[in-house]
Image (tube, grey):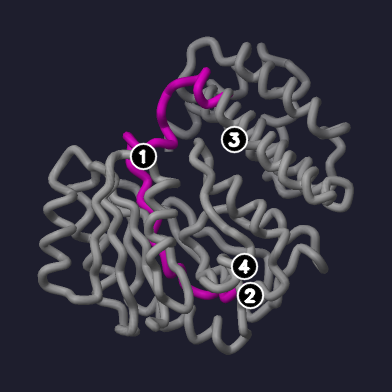
Amino acid sequence: MHKVSVIVPVYNVEAYLTRCVASIQKQTESDIEIILVDDGSPDACGEICDRFAETDDRIRVIHQANSGQAVARNAGLAVAEGEYILFVDSDDWIEPDLVEITYSAAKEFSAEMLVFDSQAVDEQGRVLYHTTQKAATGTLLSAKTDKSFLLTDPSPWNKLLKRSWLSENHFAFPNMYYEDLIALTCLDAAVERGVYIGGKPLYNYFLRQNSTLRNGDAQKTTEKRIAAVNAIYDFYKKNDLTEFYRSELAWIAIYHGFFLPAREILNFTAQPFPYVDKLRENLQSVCEAPNENMYLERFSAKEKWIFRLLYGRHYFFTKVFWKLNAILRDSK
């Protein structure tokens, strides 16, 4: 059994795939398997994957009809043999010592889930932000003892996950939009031995202009965000955990189901406010008094203003604030 299985869903990224796979091959910990899942990519990705497999016996390739990122990740997970699982997106890349550092820490703390730092990098190579946790390195994490753990960044690629534990919890990505948000937020409730290690960012998240997160479709964004939030609430209701995590689930609905999509829609839609109204209506249907939630302090001062304006339906002032903010940003 390998120490770590690295699962990479691959679709339409031939310009970035070599950088991604090479960064995994160059890990200082060599006891890994690399699973490339070609999700019916229409470009040369399938051939690139096969060429990598010909020269590195740690690599196996799965070719499948296009089914989406969730199905591709699940396909990789189904054949993985490593003690731990690492998910890497095919346009991103990882630091050379990521596996060595995270596996060593996971073994030291007998971790089910190990969380580490990442950074977002744009197409010009600029680091836009560094994602970290509000905890000391080596801190044991569990939503059962600290409810705020439920609010951990729901990305699969900033975590090392114990494969046997995932299997025990019947983990799989749902085949729908925002599958990461749904899968990881639901998984958090099962964590008893989570560990955070800080320091330098180990994962490089590539922000490109034509990514799926910037689809420009306000109706789709609205519908899919609402569906994702409702799926999370359905899971917690089914497991009789809604009341226990009342404030945390409300914050997830506020941030992921209202604030983030509303902000996205403001960026790419001429008439955003009918969609914001739909998001607001769903937010009110799943939680009480969202404007009084204890986690609103997580917002920056600017974000608080945006949230208050949007939630209060002060759309004229929202437009003014947004235009001024764009002018100030472009002048820098």
Disc 1 secondary structure class:
loop
Reading the image, the residue beneath label 3 is 260
Task: Identify residue for label 1.
Answer: 67
Residue 207 sits inside the magenta stretch = yes
Discs 3/4, front:
4
Label 2 residue SS:
strand
Q: In screen coordinates, is 278 left or right of 164?
A: right
Q: Are marks 2 and 1 in contact (CB under 8 Å)?
A: no
Residue ID for mark 4: 168
Question: Taking 62 as reference, is 328 above or below it?
Answer: above
Amino acid type of the residue tagged 1 in the rendering: Ser
Residue range in magenta is: 195-222
Do the CB atoms of the residues marked 4 and 1 lie less than 8 Å apart? no
- The dot on residue 195 is 2
**Among the two numbered marks 2 and 3 on one chain, the one whose residue lies closer to the N terminus:** 2
Amino acid type for the residue under numbered disc 4: Glu
User: How many numbered callouts?
Assistant: 4
Q: Position of residue 270 (x, y in %)?
A: 49, 12
The residue at 67%/23% (across/down) is 279
Task: Indicate the secondary structure of the residue bearing disc 3.
Answer: helix
Lower position in the chain sequence, tag 4 or tag 1: 1
Q: In x, y percent, where is residue 56?
A: 17, 74
In the rendered image, residue 188, in percent from the top left (x then y), is placed at 67, 59
Q: Earlier in the sequence, mark 3 or mark 4?
A: 4
Query: How far, Cα to Cα, is label 4 from label 1?
Result: 25 Å
Q: Nearer the viewer, residue 119 or 173?
A: 173
Residue visible at 74% across and 68% down in the picture: 142
